[in-house]
Every structure is written in structure tokens, then in C-alpha cells.
Image (spheres, helix red, strand yellow):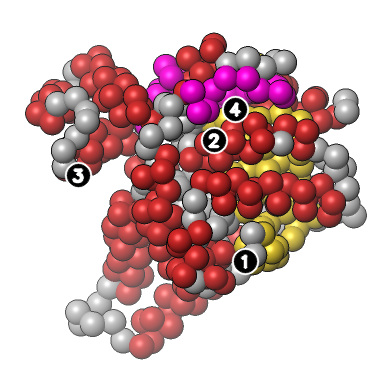
Amino acid sequence: MRLSNLIRSVLVAHVCAVGALAFAQESAQPSPADYQKFDAVRAFLQARNARDYAIAGPNAIDEGKYVELGGIDQWVTIRGENRDNPVLLFLHGGPGDATNPWSYAVFRSWLRHFTVVQWDQRGTGRTLGRSGPSVAPTITIERMVADGLELTEWLRESLGKDKVIVLGHSWGSILAVLMVKSRPELFHAYVGTGQVVDETRNLVVAYDEVLKKAQSLGELRAVDELRSIGRPPFTDGRSFAVQRKWANQFEGADRFIAEMLGLGYFAAGYSLRDVHDWLDGQQLTADRLVPLTSELTIKDLGGRFELPVFVIQGTEDFTTPTILAREFVETIEAPRKELALIDGGHFAVFMEPEAFLQELVQRVRPLALTR
């Protein structure tokens, strides 16, 4: 899901609102002392987050490092309360929406049950900060899959595990599917959420689902605006923006995005340069990958899997429609396949992390403990 423009506008509003509340004064121009106060507030909140989300214990792991993947350094974090727990490799969506800057809060409870690995993919976040935008020509689906498999091999060796669990969100579900199809022996299971199934059908199905939701709620303005743009394919960006606006509102995504920005802006150890790289990577990576993913169909992403497949989906996902996720699970072949629905939409994994964790612990974690 492409969020970069919305994220930038919300971030500007967020920073301006904080500044206005903290430094309101008669002069329209803040003084240097005002900026120092704001920096002090940010430093205080970063230190608080470092303390509140710290991991302790004799067998805990909390590492962030650059790992060479595909010829460039890429940022990887590894966090968990017990190194003996199964390793869960989380692949972020977007393309380009790195989760490392803000998910320290969302995934904190997961660390009791899993060693959670997050990766700023090629062209995103701190990986972009290290390499610069010159890597853009190398941002292809094939290269991203190869990077992900290299990372998996490195994790197996460095953490002493035979296999890992891979969880992909949105674009990350495409990446994870292609990784497990290529090297199923590296993984205990595949878990998808915000599952991408058929990009050629996605917008039309999503439009129909959003319109149905608007009608069921009696949201006349939404109905009028959606009918005015008509069903996809869209011929202009405005039409896509209208559909996305109402999908976000019905999913509660606007609230999630605001919370995400606050967590990212006050993340421990993150500089303003890191925040800029996080935002810039969303646009850079999306520009390269969206044209490549837009033609993918269920023939590319479905079919036969040689490992267990789980899709944990929000009941009302109007971005990667839940109806298509159900179709995906029903039509694939796998040694074991399950669809679990939880409250929420496209960002259910982040907005309902405890419900999502419960499904992981009950359905997926046992597979990694018995092998």
C-alpha cells in the first residue's frame, strides 16, 4: 500500500501541532530557545521509549546491525526475550514502508513467544540511508527475493536455527510467497496478512467492497463520491485517492497512521535523518516495484506450496480485499492451509496485535517447536 504522500502530510501536521502546543507565543517565529525546548522534549520521549520497551534477561537478544545482502549493507533488527524461541521474520509492506522505526511498541508482547526479525529492505529506511538512491535500478522483484533468501540463510547460521517462520504484510506477502516457493526448505511456515492475491483484480474488488460498506453504513457522501469516479480502471490519480480515502476511513487507517508517525518520530536511537530516509524510501521503492507488481495474478502467487500456509486477515480489508484472501486459501494446494479472520482491516496486524499474536501462538508457533 502506498502511503508516502499521506504520511508526509500527516507528519507535517503532527510536528506543527506539537510545536504549536508546546511553543505557542505572540511571535509568529519560534526562537532558538523554542527549538531547543522541542529537541529536549523529543530527547526525553526517546529516552522513555528506550526504557519502556527495553528487553532484559540472560537469554534475551536485542540487536540492530547492517548485514551485507545482495552486495549492499541492509539494516536488520533482532529482538526477543528468549533466543530459544522460534524466529519470526517479518517482511514489511509498501513497497517501502519499513516498520523498524515504530513497531518496537506494536510487537513488544510478541517478543515473549518469538525472536522477531525486521529488515529495512533494499531502498528503504536505514538501508537507503547507507546505500543512497543509486541502488534504485537494482530494486526488482527478483533482487528483493534473492536478498530475502540471503537474509534467511544468514539468520539460520547466526541464530542457530534450521528454519524460520516468515510473515509478510501487503507487498511483503508477495515477497514472502515468492521466497517460500523458491526455497521452502528454509521455512517452518508462511504467514500472510493484507494478503495480495491478484493485483489485476484487486482495485475492482476493493472498489466494490468499499461501496458496499458505504451503502451499509448509510454514508451518502462516500456513496456519491465513489459512484462519481466509477469502477476501476482509473484514468487519473484523483479517482484512486477517493477510493483510498474511504477505504482508510472505514478501516480506521488514518488513526493508525498518526500513531505510527508519532512512534517513529520519537523512536529511541533514530535521528531526523533516519526519519527522512524512512519517508524517502517509500517513494523510491514504490516507484520501482509497483509497476512490476501490478500485473501479478493468482497464477503467479497461488498454486502449490510445499509448506504450511496461514493467512491471518482483517475481516474488513478494503485494500487487499478479504474476499480475495479467502479465495487464495481455498484455491492453493499446501500440506496445511488455514484462514483466520480477526477484527480490523489492512493494518490488522498492527492495530490488533494481541489478537494476531494469539493466532500465531495457537496455529503457527507449535510447528517450529516440534521440528
Q: Which residue is mark 4?
A: 355
Tell me the magenta residue range: 299-324
Return the residue at label 3: 237
CA distance separating discs 1 and 4: 36 Å
Q: Residue drawn 50% across and 59% down?
A: 138
Looking at the image, which residue is at 29% across and 57% down?
A: 9
- Answer with the quarter of the image where residue 218 lies: top left
Q: Nearer the viewer, mark 1 or mark 4?
A: 1
Residue 132 percent coordinates (x, y) = 49, 71
**Residue on which the image places disc 1:** 72
Name the residue beneath numbered marker 2. Answer: 173
Of the numbered discs 1 and 3, the one sitting upstream in the chain is 1
Q: Tag 4: residue type? A: Ala
Q: Is 41 or 170 nearer to us in this picture?
A: 170
Report, in whole angstroms, how far the alpha carbon at label 3 lies from the one at label 2. 25 Å
Name the spot of residue 346 as percent of width and height, x first: 44, 33
Q: Earlier in the sequence, mark 4 or mark 3?
A: 3
Which is in the foreground here, disc 1 or disc 2? 1
The residues bearing labels 4 and 2 have C-alpha atoms spaced at a distance of 19 Å
* Tag in front: 1 or 3: 1
Left or right: where 191 falls relative to 213 = right
Q: Earlier in the sequence, mark 1 or mark 2?
A: 1
Q: Earlier in the sequence, mark 1 or mark 4?
A: 1
Q: Residue furthest bottom?
A: 32
